[in-house]
Amino acid sequence: MGAIDDIADGYVDQWAVLEPIGATYIGIAGYDDKLSDLSPDGFAARAELDRKTLAELNRTQPTDERERVAKEAMEERLGLALELNDAGMTTSELNVISSPLHAVRSIFDLMPLAGEEAAANIAARMSATPSALAEWRNTLLLAAQAGHVVARHQMLEVANQCDIWTDTAGDNFYPLLVERVTAANPGLSAGLVSDLERGAAAAREATSDVARFLRKDLAPHGKENQAVGVDAYRLASRHFLGASIDLHETYEWGFEELARLESEMRTVADKIVPGGTVDDAVVALDAEPARNIEGKDAFRRWMQELADQAIADLHGTHFDVPEPVRRIECCIAPTSDGAIYYTGPSEDFTRPGQMWWAVPLGVTTFSTWREVTTVYHEGVPGHHLQVAQTAYRSELLNRWQRLLCWVSGHGEGWALYAERLMDELGYLADPGDKLGMLDSQAFRAARVVVDLGMHLELEIPRDNPFGFHPGERWTPQLGWEFMRAHCRVPDENLRFELNRYLGWPGQAPSYKVGERIWLAARDAAKARKGADFDLKSFHGDALNLGSVGLDVLQASIARL
């Protein structure tokens, strides 16, 4: 390890002090009783750390190719973080999936429940929630007064989420968390139980206060138009991809890719219902009892079995999976937001990588043909292999690379690439499972079109392959209509998805655009190496770079 690695490792230590929530998220011990400073001063301190570290990197030369990649990756990430901060996009961040509010709520999901210390940490963190959320409310208000503010619609949707999290008929998150802690600790002292109950009541009330604040105080400042415009979108896209792309070419490619996938779906559907449509095939698949699972616990067990089987099959054949990475835990999330996501292991792997499903309220039946590809996306060879292997490679990657560097286009692009790879390897030979994968891919292609179209308020091509409102300008209503026409997603999930796109510009396209760049990198390596190209070696070499911006990825792979 050289000077670049020393800078990176030092950054992690300083960052953890400023980001206790993040420290818990990546599994650094010692911060589980604290919350991050969400005041303007807290944001400023984190930005100053980025500035100071960038200056150190600029003065330091890498000693070898490995450090060169580390330096390029860190400069790209910290540089973009500062651009976002200076543009007011960090302090004003608020949407239905990513904000300090969501970080505060979700961090409890990753905290251990058993033991007096674990219970005391949860009690302390819940007790600190009112202060942290009050700091955040002030940060949002000051940012709004300076002209940095999101659309009013996002504020109201997040307020609705707060209502669900605090409703006794909804998620009732904090009181139920106390029940889970006390169930895990039958002999807990009365004093600590009282601390937990007081903390839960305070955190619950603070979350309700956020809902009132968003509706009464912040909403009057909110933008009416949900489109962010080209300048903000271009910056957000660079952040999520780690690459600069031609936004208009990508928009046009989204139509082409969706049309290609839907054509392939029709071919596969004919194998399920000869002469039938894709919708006929979906009806037939949903009617098969063997493809339906009743109950959340049964569905979680099915996910776990499939994830474990994929690891067993792929290790030693197509990948070399390190021993600690061969463990993944499938979980039902304690909220009902409708999201599916992965969280990485702790630094010491005592907490494994986890696949989460936040099941919408009322949903009790699950169609496996839709979700086989989801397990591969979130598990192995998708996120779990990528993230957990990166965390394990201490002999190749510094601590910042292993724990903190995450680029959505790299990670989500790899996970979509992993879905396609499993088809190439024969794991989606069943027509129903193949249709599920194609439907998932088409869903991601459709949102390339919708996300770019809505935020840039683009004209819908007059010759678009679907005959969809030719010549009109995109609006959220047209986005809803397009997604409903091209996605087989329940309305309650799709509403969340559309709100996510409107509040998180540039993130949703990073999946399909990231996959596109991963495929281009593989094709370039094949062309360069010819008969010497080996797919297993390509995957190993690429993943051993860690999560990097996609421009850095392509340049680094070209040098291998």
Image: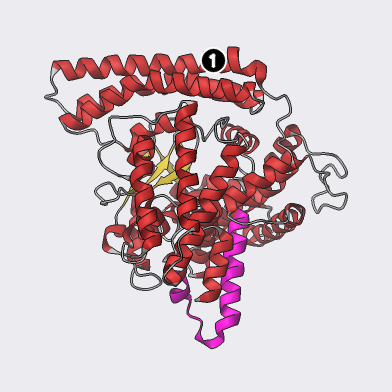
Residue marked by disc 1: 213
Q: Which residues are magenta?
A: 512-539
Residue 189 in the image: state x and y as whole percent.
13, 20
Q: Nearer the viewer, residue 309 or 395?
A: 395
| Residue 94 position by quadrant | top right
Q: Nearer the viewer, residue 18 or 206?
A: 18
| Residue 468 position by quadrant | top right
Q: Amino acid at mark 1?
A: Phe
Q: Where is 475 relative to 63, above or below?
A: above
The residue positioned 64% from the left and 41% from the top of the image is 505
- In the image, taking residue 406 as reference, residue 146 lies left or right, namely right
| Residue 382 position by quadrant | bottom left
Residue that lies at the very extreme toward the front in this rendered image: 59
The residue positioned 87% from the left and 53% from the top of the image is 463
- Based on the picture, tell me whether residue 80 belongs to the magenta stretch: no
Find numbered disc 1 in the image and state the secondary structure of the residue it sits on.
helix
Q: Where is 323 relative to 168, above or below?
A: below
Residue 216 in the image: state x and y as whole percent.
59, 12
The residue positioned 69% from the left and 53% from the top of the image is 277
